[in-house]
Amino acid sequence: MPTRSSVSAPRRWAGLALSLVVLLVVWSVVAAADLVQPHYLTPSPLEVWHAFVRANSHHAVGGGIDRVVRGEENYFLWEHLLVSLRRIGLGLALGVVVGVPLGLLMGSVRWIGDLVGPYVDFLRSLPPLAYIGFLVAWFGIYDTLKVWLLFLAAFPPITLATVNGVRGVRLDQLNAVRSLGASRLQTTRHVILPATLPDILSGLRVAVGFAWTTVVAAELVNGLPGIGGLAYLSGTQNKIALSVACILVIGLTAIALDAVIRSIEKLVVPWRGKA
């Protein structure tokens, strides 16, 4: 007898496919209706697809075969994406390296949590563009600026998720290992960290989302190559179809990364969600 999950999975995929078809039809009708003038402000799905293909191939410009350019801004779109992924990866890695130990410390030592917590909340509440002015003054316009901006977006959710995980560890578990003579380091390594891992992974998922919403801001200044920088530049140059293509690539990549993290979470903490 088929299980409930095996029956519902095809229905979910069918529903997703149907919603995608409806979206493309509505999008095409709106674009064809020319409700917004000039026409390039509302590109059709086909025009966006052509912009995507053009951005990933060599093509002639100006009508002359002697002027063949490579992708957009001399990089293919996938190369822009890889550069942004590298920047995001560095920012997330710094967020984990700093945020997890700090979160463990804040959750384990109450007075440190009370002292540092308001500062982490303050950083969490600020929009990324609020940092960019003084970060340019401190680090210039190159990749260091972008990595720091992405770190500041990723660091607070990772830290706060770790704190919540530590404070959710059952007291009887801590007392049990302490009664057996475990040191603070051994308690953290063998009890607190494994128990907190699901919350850390949840914080990482949130941080990835914040990093992707920040990548365009991070690449406003000297952001090429970079998918966020290309999305911004193409919009300022009225290449709206290319800008929409970049936005779709950013969104789909973010969904794919979230799916990867959820798969890792199922492997690393399979007990989560089970009674």
Image (cartoon, grey):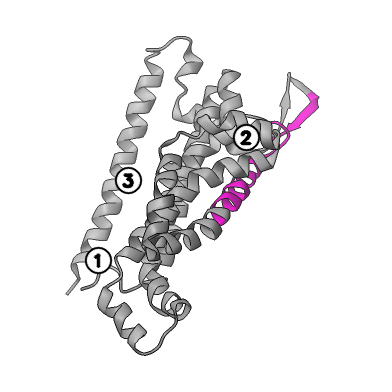
147 or 159, nearer to the observer: 159
* Residue linked to disc 3: 17
**Image-quadrant location for residue 147:** top right
235 or 46, nearer to the observer: 235
Task: From the top left corner, tell me how far across and down residue 186 is, in percent.
Answer: 45, 81
Say whether disc 3 or disc 2 marks the residue closer to the N-terminus: 3
Residue at 29% across / 65% down in the picture?
168
Point out the residue furthest to the bottom here.
180
Label ID, residue 6: 1
Asked whether, in this view, residue 166 is left or right of residue 97, the answer is left
**Image-quadrant location for residue 203:** bottom left
For label 3, the crowd category at 10 Å Cα-Cα, with few meaning under 14, some 14 to 19 and many 20 or more, is few
* Residue linked to disc 2: 135
What kind of element bears circle 1?
helix
Q: What amino acid type should be assigned to the residue bearing mark 1?
A: Ser
Asked whether, in this view, residue 72 is left or right of residue 46, the answer is right
Q: What amino acid type should be assigned to the residue bearing mark 2?
A: Leu
Task: From the top left corner, tell me how far across and down residue 161 is, in percent.
Answer: 38, 56
Depth-wise, is mark 3 or mark 2 nearer the camera?
2
Say whether disc 1 or disc 3 marks the residue closer to the N-terminus: 1
Give the residues in magenta.
65-93
For label 2, the crowd category at 10 Å Cα-Cα, with few meaning under 14, some 14 to 19 and many 20 or more, is some
Label ID, residue 121: none
Residue at 73% across / 34% down in the picture?
74
Task: From the top left corner, tell me how far across and down residue 1 is, in percent.
Answer: 17, 75
